[in-house]
Amino acid sequence: MENAALMLKKKGIKATPQRLAIYYLLKNTKSHPSADTIYQELSSQFPTMSLATVYKTLDLLTKIGLIQEINVGEDSFRYDANTTSHPHIICLKCKKVEDVEDYCPLDSLGIVAEKTNYNIVSQQLFFYGYCPECNDGE
Amino acid sequence: MENAALMLKKKGIKATPQRLAIYYLLKNTKSHPSADTIYQELSSQFPTMSLATVYKTLDLLTKIGLIQEINVGEDSFRYDANTTSHPHIICLKCKKVEDVEDYCPLDSLGIVAEKTNYNIVSQQLFFYGYCPECNDGE
DNA sequence: TTACCTGCAAATTCTTTGCACACGC
DNA sequence: GCGTGTGCAAAGAATTTGCAGGTAA
């Protein structure tokens, strides 16, 4: 799991510098950047890289399960290299997205699957509010 | 609560036919239509109504708390006249959005607020999967 | 060479905005 | 008549796609 290059090779996908850079950026940050943020942060290392490449890479990594795409509502998608299902909390003011420990085990997935007859694949739990910094400013 | 026209008046907002139509359409459907779907469904009653009006009205109704905007990820926003916080289940194939009864009371809101120091305003719980109809087709 | 990948630019989709006309009080 | 609301069209933003050239095995 540590070696993303191997993971990619196993899937028959070339481990290009751009792809690895995007993956490791996500792996080493606690923030949940948008495609555009990733693009800007990598533009110093890869001045020629285009936003389209970032999108293509993010789609690719999402499809093979190396990262997950989360949709917090406001504007754009966010990305997370932590592919386990964990809740997120979003600041409505500064748009920061943070992880939340899973206090409620939420076995509800099984219950919901049974009740709805859906074949459930994943779940997302979001909390919306104001982070301590933004709340102080009020 | 039943009379939307009164609710609007109380807020100093005119209860126009378009606004009421949009609200009642949402109130009387179990689906969670997108702005465009609402537009299409009302175009027979209001042939001259524009999509911009639908968006403006949806924003307005959301702001005054008569409806809620939910963001299921894929493509566009969905709208719901049920403003209580209840989980939704989304079919990844036909994009249908359905309500789910709240099996887990999720007092986690209080716990999370305490642990994170956020001033939490709302929460959203989504389940993603394949509905019985779409799953059969596989 | 061959297949895959990148990066540019254009296209697409969803949503918002500006503005002029229309309506009700 | 005035203020608000509607509808058209254009703008804006996020994301996707097509294609030509580049790179690595």
Image (cartoon, coloured by chain):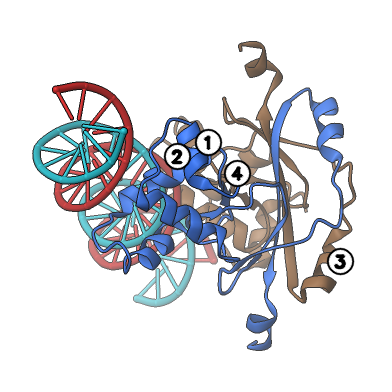
Chain colours: A blue, B brown, C red, D cyan
Which sits in the foreground, C6 or A104? C6
Q: Residues within 10 Å of mark 1 (few under 14, many from 20)?
A: few
Disc 3 residue crowd, few under 14, some 14–19, many 20+, Cα 10 Å: few
Query: Helix, strand or loop at disc 4?
Result: loop
Residue A63, percent across and down? 51, 36
**Residue A3 showing in the rendered view:** yes
Does A119 sit above or below residue A62? Answer: above
User: In the visual, does A133 lie left or right of A16?
Assistant: right
Q: Position of residue A133 (x, y in %)?
A: 65, 83
Q: Amino acid at mark 1?
A: Ile
Q: CA distance from mark 3 to mark 1?
A: 36 Å
Horizontal and vertical percent for residue A12? Answer: 43, 30
- The vertical placement of A37 against B137, above or below, is below
- Identify which residue, A45 or B11, lies in the foreground: A45
Which residue lies at the image location 77% right of the left edge and 76% below the top edge?
Answer: B117
Q: Are marks 1 and 2 in contact (CB under 8 Å)?
A: yes
Q: Which mark is residue B14?
A: none
- Locate the C terminus of chain B by quadrant: top right
Looking at the rendering, which quadrant does residue B129 occupy?
A: top right
Q: Is residue B39 visible?
A: no
- The circle on residue A64 is 1
Circle on res. B72: 4
State left or right for residue A102 relative to residue A34.
right
Please tell me which of labels 3 and 4 falls first in the chain.
4
Furthest-bottom residue in view? Answer: A137
**Would you call the spot at circle 4 few (<14 residues within 10 Å), some (14-19), or many (20 or more)?**
many
Residue, disc 3: B110
Q: Secondary structure at mark 1?
A: loop
**Chain for numbered disc 4:** B
Query: Which of label 4 and label 1 is nearer to you?
Result: 1
Pinpoint the chain carrying mark 1: A
Q: Tell me the SS state at disc 2.
A: helix
